[in-house]
Amino acid sequence: MYPAGTLRIDELPPDERAVYATLKPEHLPEHVAIIMDGNGRWAGRRFLKRFQGHLEGAKSVQLVTETASRIGLPWLTLYAFSLENNLRRPRAEVSFLMRLLRSYLESNLQRMMDNNVRMRYIGRTHDLPPEVQEKMLWAEEATARNTGTTLTLALNYGARTELVDAFRALAAEMKQKHIGPEQIGEQDIYRHLYTAHMPDPDLLIRTSGEMRLSNFLLWQIAYTEIFVTERLWPDFRGTHLLEAIAAFQQRERRYGGLGEGCGEVEEDPERIRIAAG
Ligand code: FPP
């Protein structure tokens, strides 16, 4: 077993190792979140059925997770199934995705163990079919003692619903502990999010070129760097994860402060007369 963050760079395939060599290992993100999009288009371009796109997408999930674990990425969060997917997609596609998830968990468990990956989930998972929940719990328990990358699958997830769930839990706590609204701060909301146990994402990747957040982790991505690629999810591999990390390392994160090259700071801004009009 590998302790958290242990590198297994020697296990990267040569193309991934070449991109990894361009990275600054001391500035790797701690948490990468991915909106996996484009399975349907990938299939459509090949005159295949949509479900074949999802099947290929599941292979990308495993390969990208393995790259993440080899470079010692602590947190990888994948948007696998949204509340809106559940409500708005044809029943046949939803039930295919549910079967795919079950079979994915079953057939990839050994690879997760070999890669020291821990499985977690976020979302209203209690509304998923019982047999899916059973398999999810089985995989979570089997991998619970792994210490490498935590792979979190967002399933039946919506960020606004997450906030509703958080506010409900917070309101109940406030009532029980007789806490007034003026005593509530950001940390109290954070504590009740599904993601309370993990850091906010440093990098959000979206495949297939859409410039949307699609109700994903809206609270958590306040200062996250966003990387959008035209590549469709079934074509996305570990090497593309590493390229996204390379682009992330070129960014200057300011968190609302000033960065380099922002001009000289005036010593006494009070002395500057503002001429309006
Ligand atoms: C978006 O493609 C993808 C999804 C709605 C589901 C994501 C599912 C997978 C990647 C496969 C299964 C995952 C696991 C964890 C086993 P889309 O269908 O919206 O593509 P389109 O926008 O091109 O139609």
Image: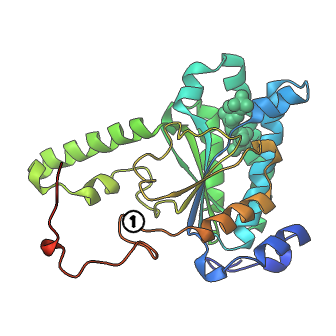
Compared with 105, 256 (above or below) is below
Residue drawn at point x = 12 percent, y = 52 percent = 177
* Depth check, front residue: 55 or 221: 221
* Depth check, front residue: 274 or 169: 274
Horizontal and vertical percent for residue 222?
41, 54
Residue 256 shown left or right of residue 203 in the figure: left
All told, the count of numbered labels is 1
Secondary structure beneath dot 1 equals: loop
Residue 6 shown left or right of residue 203 in the figure: right
Given the image, on which type of amino acid does mark 1 rest?
A: Tyr
Residue 40 shown left or right of residue 74 in the figure: right
Q: Which residue is mark 1?
A: 255
Q: Quadrant of residue 65?
A: bottom right
Mark 1 burial class by Cα count in 10 Å: few <14, some 14-19, many 20+: few
Compared with 190, 147 (above or below) is below
Compared with 28, 113 (above or below) is above
Q: Please indicate, yes or no, whether residue 54 appears anywhere in the rendered image.
A: yes
The figure's colour scheme reads rainbow
Residue 214 shown left or right of residue 176 in the figure: right
Horizontal and vertical percent for residue 61?
74, 50
Q: Quadrant of ligand 1?
A: top right
Q: Quadrant of residue 40?
A: top right
